[in-house]
Amino acid sequence: MYEPIRTKSVHSVAATTTSAPPRRSRAEELDFQLAGHLSALLTVTDELRALAPSDDLGHAADQLAASVTRLRHGHPPARLPRPSETGAPTDRITALHRRAHALAGRALVVAASRQDTASATLAAKRLDAHEAAVAAA
């Protein structure tokens, strides 16, 4: 009446054949987060540079790109092309400075947690620069 199971249990096979997914260490996770925050800040900085070109924004964008490349072990971030037009609305520029200020603050928190002095210094400088730009607007 009852026929015994002739194959192995699905549960026992699954338990022995699957391996745990690779995990990142805390330091690797902080590198990943910091690279993400700096990449987002770079994107906003490139957009600001395209709308209102300045040497300060160009230099900051280059520094951010270098930091992201270092954190990504040599893989450079995607970048906007160099600015070609001027005359953007000031409301848009002010909004971008506010967004960049928030992103720089996030990057500063992660860089401090990671104890990355170079990234923390860069984020603090960008924080001050965007705060000054918002205050001037």
Image (cartoon, grey):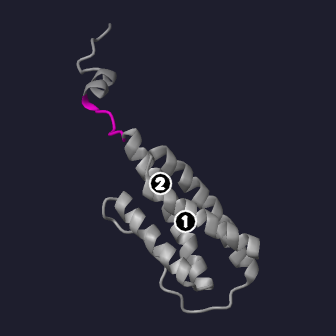
Instruction: Give the residues drawn in magenta, as a range.
Output: 17-24
Crowding near the residue tagged with mark 1, few <14, some 14–19, many ≥20 C-alpha atoms within 10 Å: many
Looking at the image, is 99 positioned above or below residue 82?
A: above
Whether residue 117 is visible to the viewer of this picture, yes or no, is: yes
Amino acid type, mark 2: Leu
Q: Residue at x 28, y 11 (%)?
A: 3
Q: The N terminus is located in which quarter?
A: top left
Crowding near the residue tagged with mark 2, few <14, some 14–19, many ≥20 C-alpha atoms within 10 Å: many
Looking at the image, is 41 positioned above or below residue 23?
A: below
Q: Residue at x 30, y 64 (%)?
A: 74
Please state which of residues 9 and 126 is positioned toward the viewer in this rendering: 126
Q: Position of residue 54 (x, y in %)?
A: 57, 84
User: Looking at the rendered structure, which numbered label has been put on residue 41?
Assistant: 1
- Is residue 61 left or right of 18 when viewed as pictured? right
Q: Residue at x 41, y 39 (%)?
A: 26
Q: Residue at x 58, y 54 (%)?
A: 106
Which secondary structure type mostly characterizes the magenta part of the structure? loop
Q: Which residue is the extreme one toward the top?
A: 1
Q: Position of residue 104 (x, y in %)?
A: 58, 60
- Is residue 7 left or right of 67 when viewed as pictured? left
Q: Mark 2 highlights which residue?
A: 34
Amino acid type, mark 1: Leu
- Is residue 128 left or right of 31 when viewed as pictured? right
Q: Which SS class for mark 2?
A: helix
Please state which of residues 57 and 121 is positioned toward the viewer in this rendering: 121
Whether residue 35 is visible to the viewer of this picture, yes or no, is: no
Looking at the image, is 1 positioned above or below residue 105?
A: above
